[in-house]
Image (cartoon, rainbow, N blue to C red):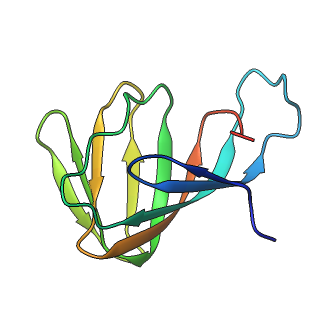
Amino acid sequence: HVPPLTRFPFCIIGDIFTTASSDAPNPLTGSLFLLEKLENPDPAPKYEYDESGIVVKGELHVADEKGNSAKLLPGDTFFIHRGSTITFSTPRYAVAYKVAARRKMH
């Protein structure tokens, strides 16, 4: 199964699983996240939801608006707090599985 892909200027996301009821008050969505090297990565929009993930392949660099940063490798996990502005980057590519408190994109 190949999930529908949503392309952003900084990444590609494919939502795989989501809360069964479209009107559930606290939806949860699981996604595959692909990031390729960009020369000047822009920050993602301000997060309106909490998100957690695990790096599956490659190397993912995560930095927030406060100057906190992390270099993540396969098996490393991360958590992004609602209200954060995050910049994702990678020296080559990164694949992660993420779960977010949001509705499915497609």
Please report the residue visible at 44 percent of the width from the left and 55 percent of the height from the top: 11
Residue at 19% from the left image edge and 52% from the top image edge: 40
The answer to whether 37 appears left or right of 56 in the picture is: left
User: Which residue is the extreme one toward the right?
Assistant: 21
Residue 88 locus on image (x, y percent): 30, 53
Q: Which residue is located at x 27 percent, y 67 percent?
A: 90
Q: Is residue 51 above or below residue 74?
A: above
Residue depicted at 42% across the width and 30% down the height: 47
Check the image and report above or below for 9 versus 94: above
Q: Residue furthest left?
A: 67
Question: Horizontal and vertical percent for residue 72?
Answer: 29, 68
Task: Tell me where residue 99 appears, x and y as whole percent.
Answer: 59, 49
Question: From the viewer's perspective, is residue 23 above or below residue 69?
Answer: above
Which quarter of the picture shows residue 80?
top left
Q: Quadrant of residue 85?
A: top left
**60 with respect to 71 (left or right):** right
Q: The N terminus lies in which quarter of the figure?
A: bottom right
Q: Nearer the viewer, residue 99 or 87?
A: 87
Front one among 12 and 24? 12
Q: The C terminus appears in which quarter of the rendering?
A: top right
Query: x, y (%) of residue 57?
Result: 44, 79
Query: Is 16 on the left-hand or right-hand side of 37?
Result: right
Q: How many marks?
A: 0
